[in-house]
Amino acid sequence: MKSILAFVIVGLVFLPGHSKKEEVSGKVTIDYNVGINYVTHLYTLANIGFADEEYCNKYSHTVPLEDIKTLQKYQEYLRFENGKSGLLTSNFFFIPAYANLKSKGDYLQYSHDFAMAMKNKSCATVMKYLPDNQKESFCQLFSASDEEWQNILAVNKVFEEIMAIYVNNIDTYLKDVFPFVEKDLISRSEYLNNAVSKKNIVADWEEVTGYDWPLANKTYLLFRAGRMGPSFNNLSANVNTLYYQLDDDYTLDMFGHEFGIFLMFDSIMPIFHDFGNVYPQYESQTNVGRVNWMAFEMLATFFNCKISGHKTLDYYNFGNSDPIAFMAIYEKLYRNGITNPKDLYEQGVNEYMKPNGMWHTGVVDRNNDFVKEVSIRQGK
């Protein structure tokens, strides 16, 4: 079944391409807003991919149990992980967070605008909620065939039921939750901005890749709820989100990693999609089974390590991407003069997937070696 999500999720979860050159400031900033914090508040209290015992103990009383049960009933529509998403994930996580919907009035207007879009089969009323370079792809939804459109409309009842929960609970959130969590967000954003100011993330990545960063600021938005859940979720070409209190060193390393993903995105995506067709997802007990995704995350990790001169902590975070293999592949190619990210990615995937090649087998053994490496690092 197609939905609004089907046309925007690639951009919102995998990053949109850059539509125009903007004046470059070369600055990474850390901030927060109500938009991302309200959606993670609801996702966390309903345990939809986010969990946080401390937060739930403090604030579970702020959302009626009946509403929590309704969200849980529809969790498959809302959940996302490893680049995969439910039918309404964009509508209730990525779009409200990107648009920074921050009041009951905002959500009522958002609900009305989507209702008008569905009624008129026109994207005009919802464009203001999306990044500029997502609008064209989003509008493809409204050129669906009559049969496809009926499938889309069939999801509307679920959309309306979930939307009522978002509308009815935000006033309580703004009164009884946000003023208190904001204190933590202010303190943490100030600390991280100071730490980032001492690094040269943009310049270092431009130098190592040979690419120019085409946008202005790269912003990371902090959220307070959801300690156990997905961080570094992309809202647009230059806005990313993360849990506010991750380990300091890991957070700073991931700022570099995610910036690298953004910087390389335009050059990698055409091949990324091609490889997704050539090498479809497969079942694996040791990795995610999506070679195009694994290779891209590990390419960012490879360059991050090059910049730092040692294994950065993102390396240990992508154990599901066969890191030992890809780091060895990229290092060999790099030493042989293949330094352009696009060429590294293309040749790296082909080498990894070469029939009867050295990486064709041994995945389990490499994973065991990686687990040992992590244990040694942790002093276990």
Image (cartoon, helix red, strand yellow):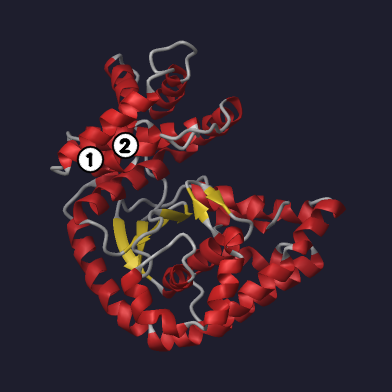
Residue furthest to the right = 146
Q: Is residue 365 above or below residue 238?
A: above
Residue at figure coordinates x 67%, y 58% from the top left = 4
- Asked whether the viewer can see residue 203, the reply is yes
Residue at figure coordinates x 36%, y 34% from the top left = 298
How many numbered tags mark residues here? 2
Residue at figure coordinates x 48%, y 66% from the top left = 97
Question: For the residue labelled by badge 2, is the local secondary structure a helix, a strand or a loop?
Answer: helix
In the rendered image, residue 262, in percent from the top left (x then y), is placed at 41, 45
Amino acid under disc 1: Thr
Circles 1, 2 touching at the beta carbon (< 8 Å): yes
Residue 312 bears which disc, if any?
1
Q: Is residue 373 above or below residue 7?
A: above
- Asked whether the viewer can see residue 15, the reply is no
Question: For the residue labelled by badge 1, is the local secondary structure a helix, a strand or a loop?
Answer: loop
Q: Is residue 48 above or below residue 287?
A: below
Residue at figure coordinates x 18%, y 58% from the top left = 195
Query: Left or right: 46 with respect to 204?
Result: right
Residues 376 and 109: in front is: 376
Dot 1: few (<14), some (14–19), or many (≥20) neighbours within 10 Å? many
| Image quadrant containing the C terminus | top left
In the rendered image, residue 44, in percent from the top left (x then y), is placed at 43, 68
In the rendered image, residue 161, in percent from the top left (x then y), is placed at 66, 75
Q: Which residue is mark 2?
A: 301
